[in-house]
Structures are given as structure tokens and as C-alpha cells.
Amino acid sequence: MRYLGLDVGSRTVGVAVSDLLGWTAQGVEIIRINEDEAEFGLDRVAELVKAYDVTNFVVGLPKNMNNSIGPRAEASQAYGKMLTERFGLPVDFIDERLTTVEAERMLISQANTSRQKRKKVIDKLAAVMILQNYLDRAANQKS
């Protein structure tokens, strides 16, 4: 099984992919999208699905801090529905509260990355964190 992890925003989608064993997540790229113009980057996702022989999607679900579903989480769910309709592959959602904040902290503290450089990689790193959290949870459930 190979998973494609997605951090869906209004302007970008961070992309990560698992290894073939489903143990680790690696960042792939950031896809530029425009929700306002119904441009969701699905053609590029299709290329990645084919290139990596993806069998499942994992989409970050940005719940509110009180665990409710707000507009961004609804947008992520809508994106997941588009993925299911287009590719016919399973889509799992995982709570991604604070992953972008955590990713930014990592880039600041560990890599001492400038703000401009952080903006170029943060969504990809968030996608890695989303997918890795999913893979770790799945591994813990098996043991």
C-alpha cells in the first residue's frame, strides 16, 4: 500500500507520500491551487497517483480547537470527496490541528529557516507530518 498525504489549503496543497511498507512519509511537493476559480490541482494529483502507484489518500482535517468542524475542515472534506469521485480510492481524514504551527516551529528552531523559505516548504512539511501521524497511528493499532 502506498499513501498520498495531503495538506489542503485555499491556495496550496502540500503533498507527501509513504514508502511501500507504509512506515515513513516523505515530502513530495506543493501544488498551487485556487479555490475561488475551482482549480484544485487534481490533474497534478492524478500524475502523482500514477507515478507513485497510490492506493489510498490521507487528508488533513483542520478541526477547530473545540473539536468542531469549521469552514476549512469542510473544504478539506469537499476535497476528499472530489478525490473519491475522481480516483475511486479510499480517503481517510486525520485531525491536523496545529501541524502547520508545529511545522513552522521545526523550521525555525531546527533549520533556522528564513520566513520566505519557510513559506515555500511549510505545506509540504505539514503534509509529511499529517501522513506520518496517520502511519504511526495505524502501526500502533496493529500492535
Image: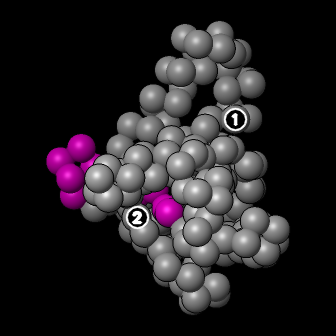
- Picture quadrant where residue 126 is located: top right
- Picture quadrant where residue 51 is located: bottom right
Percent of width and height locating residue 124? 65, 43
The residue mark sitting in front, 2 or 1, is 2
Q: Which mark is residue 93?
A: 2
Residue at (48% x, 74% y) in the render: 91
Q: Secondary structure at mark 2?
A: strand
Start-end of magenta stretch: 58-68
Q: CA distance from mark 2 to mark 1?
A: 22 Å
| Residue in front for this viewpoint, 12 or 129 | 129
Q: Secondary structure at mark 1?
A: helix
Left or right of 76 on screen, residue 29: right
Percent of width and height locating residue 102? 45, 29
Residue at (20% x, 53% y) in the render: 67
Q: Which mark is residue 121?
A: 1
Left or right of 49 on screen, residue 101: left
Q: Amino acid at mark 2?
A: Phe
Which of the two labelled residues, at mark 2 and mark 1, occupies the earlier sequence position? 2
Asked whether residue 92 is in view, the answer is: yes
Asked whether residue 123 is in view, the answer is: no
For residue 79: magenta? Answer: no
